[in-house]
Image (spheres, grey):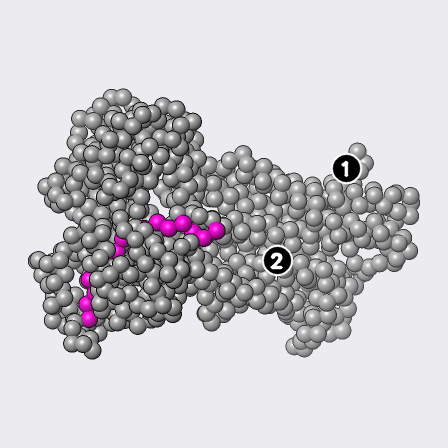
Amino acid sequence: MQFLKLIWRGALRHKLRTGLTVTGLVVAILSFGLLQTIVDAWYAGANAAAPNRLVTRNAVSLVFPMPINYREKIRAVPGVQAVAAANWFGGTYRDTTMRNFFPQFAVDAVSYFAMYPEYRIDPDAFHAFLRDRKGVVVGRKLADTHGFRVGDPIPLKGTIFPGDWEFTVRAIYDPGESTTDTSAMFFHFDYLNETLKRRSPRRADRVGVFVVAIDDVSRAAEVSHAIDELFRNSTAETLTETERAFQIGFAKQTEAIVVAIRLVSFVVIAIILAVMANTMAMTARERTAEYATLKAIGFQPAYVAGLILGESLAIACIGAALGIALTFPIGEWFSAQMGTLFPVFEVSQGTVALQVVCALIVGLAAAALPMRRAAKVRIVDGLRAIG
Amino acid sequence: MKAIPIAYSLRNLWTRRLTTVLTAGGMALVVFVFAAVLMLDAGLRAALVATGQPDNVLVTRRASGTEVQSAVERTQAAIVESAPGVATGADGRPLVSKETVVLITLPKRGTGVLTNITTRGIGPAGLALRPQVRIVAGHMLRFGTDEIVVGRSISERFDRAGLGDRLRFGGREWTIVGVFDAGGSAFDSEVWGDSEQLMQSFRRQAFSSVVLRVANVNGFDAFRDALESDPRLPVEVKRERTFYEEQSKTMSTFISYLGLTLSVIFSIGALIGAMITMYAAVANRTAEIGALRALGFRRGSILLAFLAESLLLAVLGWIIGLALASLMQWVHISTMNWQSFSELAFSFALTPRIVLSSLAFAIVMGLAGGVLPALRAARLQIVDALRAA
């Protein structure tokens, strides 16, 4: 009890210094948490992937399409439950800035949404969408970002499919799970295809990817192989992989950035370690005479070292607690500012655990040198010392 | 007003070595991050700006944004080719390259990550239009064959992409007969083949873009207006340099926003570190300050001495941080450029501007961290200070 009281009094002795150190820790733990969450958001697509979904694309690369008749051929492969065509539309809304960017897909509406039960749509609204050829379904986050409401028009300028395109919001989908991306817009593949038949017939009846639902998750590799075999030596050979592998493929290509962010998030911990170690070194140096006194009246070196460790850990823990508490509201604010750039931005339990571990390491490491010094100092030298 | 010798500040830093090293170390890390982010952005811009030649012009379909999404029909390309104002080469033919740009995927060496690679079909004038491109191994591809040449970054980073290797895409095999160096530009991350051959194997009817040189750089505006107002041509005409600058926009914005945010957050940490150190320095030396005042030094001198100490810490941090950052120049980054959706390799570039702005950043940190403690030191009453000992 007395030990704890001593630690507490020690921590409060220089209120300004302790206050500054805690502030530094809060900033560091907070930014560490946010950076880790950004890294998580990078892999959000992969985390949201369901194990029973495969993605078939052209083997050369994603920019090459496949003929629409592949849809029926894939459906006939044993183990395949359903197939839906999906095309990346790549239209620009308002202008080409990052703020106004959001993904748009032309999909076989009925079969596609049946495969994605995590997109929660009101059945009536969904029927309204099915009845409207130019109708679209938008995600909750996208709707909130741009203020889209049911009935609103969305004009897009095509980059891949030239010209102006008009859409009308018919439904808004809500996330079924915390990892569900609600920043996308979906519309009817048929609308795209019919329009292309008029505007540029050569580009019609072509599909970017097929999403394939399978019966048995354990046979994913087998079914993928069977699909690719089907089109071997054709003009458009395919590459089929699980949705997760497909999404990770995207994230992997920008891995250098993820590595940089990870690195930076550990640099911030190193910086705060330097600050914290500095505080503890100064504290211990100033109190060398006191530690010598404690030893002189019979306290063990371990007791003195414990005082320093306790104070360091106490400051680290207060800083960490505040930092973690702030991570959630600030993360929410950040996510709102970024709009649809990070479709899923959620502070995970793993991140919080990492924050705690980092704070403990900082607390321990900062105390290490001063502890050794204080425990080792000879009473005579200590009593003579000046700060 | 008599100034306190700078040696006083220097000696104080030396006496408290551990604290000095820790504070300067914290600042060094902040300077390092600040400089590294600016260097990354500068490197990215340098790579993409070096890609465009000042007198080259790129013609793409209107509103397509990237070459991969663009399509220019043969008839349209022919009109562009014969437009007045196009420069002619040494052989008397117009300096025009009708290009086919597609993406293929190759596994990265080591990790095996399938990566999108820009594959460019060029016309016979393609090489002449890019004087920064030099063949460093093997020879240039012969037109009308299955020969291809690859950029240096590709041959270094990808499996089976060396001289003499064969790549399979578009339903046929291609032989790598040469490796080229494009001076760190985006072309270093590309594969080049014969435009007509690529069109055939990918069953394309249209080119992706037309690259040409204008005879008179100053006549560019007139040249662009003439082409863009031609009702037969749904095209966009841009200087090659402008086009590639736009290609780096998303990535560059992302890097600078992220860098700015990080620098601000980190500098708060370093500021706090500097403040703690300086407050402690003042508190420990209260008696000393009193003695200095008693000797006749004015409040201003005391203020300056402590500010100088804080600045010295910051400059020390700057030197260490910048030294660390300059080592990053040997690091190459390769990532996917979101706009072109394909692999792009670039390196950290240290420019004089970055050296200066990181120095300014460090000085501001030192001043901001030192000013409050220095004020406290200057405000001490002589009698109280002397009694504190």
The answer, for residue A44, to whether it is visible in the render is: yes
Write down the quadrant of residue B311 in the picture.
bottom right
Pick the residue in front: A261 or B119.
B119
Task: Residue under label 2, please give it.
Answer: B26
Name the residue located 69 percent from the left edge and 70 percent from the top edge.
B9
Looking at the rendered structure, the kind of residue marked 2 is Gly
Q: Residues within 10 Å of mark 2 (few under 14, many from 20)?
A: many
Kindly report the distance in space between the C-alpha atoms of the residues bearing marks 1 and 2. Answer: 30 Å
Q: Residue furthest left?
A: B231
Question: Dot 1: what SS?
Answer: helix
Write down the quadrant of residue B276 in the picture.
bottom right
Q: Point out which mark residue A4 bears.
A: 1
Locate residue B125, reporting x and y percent.
22, 69
Q: Are marks 1 and 2 in contact (CB under 8 Å)?
A: no
**Left or right: where does residue B169 sit relative to residue A177?**
left
SS majority, magenta: strand
How many numbered discs sit on the rendered protein? Answer: 2
Residue B105 highlighted magenta (yes or no): yes
Looking at the rendered structure, the kind of residue marked 1 is Leu
User: Height in image: B303 above or below A320?
Assistant: below
In magenta, the rendered stretch is: B95-110
The chain to which mark 2 is attached is: B
